[in-house]
Amino acid sequence: WPRCDDRIEWMNCQEEEDNLDDSIKKLSDPSPLLDKKNAWKASWRALEGLYSSKDDNNIASIGVSNFDLPDLKELFDMCVV
């Protein structure tokens, strides 16, 4: 799931979710519309799994956006990649 923040004027969280491909939605739960604080954690774990897998998935890097310093610290504490 993308990191969504309704406080950002140009961002529309519902539209972001509606436009996201179902195959990506199946990789991780919960939807950020249901759990804005924790949804990114499951998404990050799914990205780490794809990045670390031996499959030919062509994922060269993973990253974040719309994160502030406390979020980055929390990510750093839980991340493997």
Image (cartoon, rainbow, N blue to C red):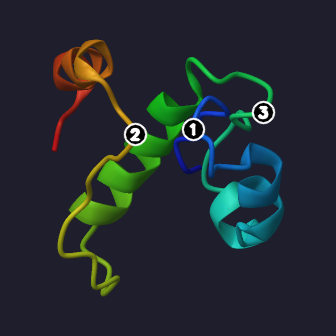
Distance, label 2 to label 3, CA atoms, is 16 Å
Amino acid carrying mark 3 in the image: Leu
Q: Earlier in the sequence, mark 2 or mark 1?
A: 1
Of residues 28 and 73, the one drawn nearer to the viewer in this rendering? 73
Residue 40 percent coordinates (x, y): 50, 34
Q: Is 62 displayed left or right of 8 in the figure?
A: left
- The residue beneath circle 2 is 66
- The residue beneath circle 1 is 8
The reply to whether callout 2 and callout 1 are in contact (CB within 8 Å) is yes
- Residue 1 lies, with reference to residue 30, above or below; the image says below
| Residue shown at the point (28%, 15%) measured from the top left | 74
Residue 49 percent coordinates (x, y): 35, 53
CA neighbours of label 3 inside 10 A, class few (<14), some (14 to 19), many (20+) = few
Q: Earlier in the sequence, mark 2 or mark 3?
A: 3
| Residue shown at the point (45%, 49%) measured from the top left | 46
CA neighbours of label 1 inside 10 A, class few (<14), some (14 to 19), many (20+) = few
- Quarter in which the C terminus is drawn: top left
Distance, label 2 to label 1, CA atoms, is 9 Å
Helix, strand or loop under label 2: loop
Amino acid carrying mark 1 in the image: Ile
Task: Report the disc number at residue 72.
Answer: none
Snapshot quadrant of residue 33: top right
| Residue shown at the point (22%, 19%) measured from the top left | 69
- The residue beneath circle 3 is 33
The reply to whether callout 3 and callout 1 are in contact (CB within 8 Å) is no
Distance, label 3 to label 1, CA atoms, is 15 Å
- Residue 2 lies, with reference to residue 45, above or below; the image says below
Of residues 15 and 10, the one drawn nearer to the viewer in this rendering? 10
The reply to whether callout 2 and callout 3 are in contact (CB within 8 Å) is no
Residue 8 percent coordinates (x, y): 57, 38
Snapshot quadrant of residue 78: top left
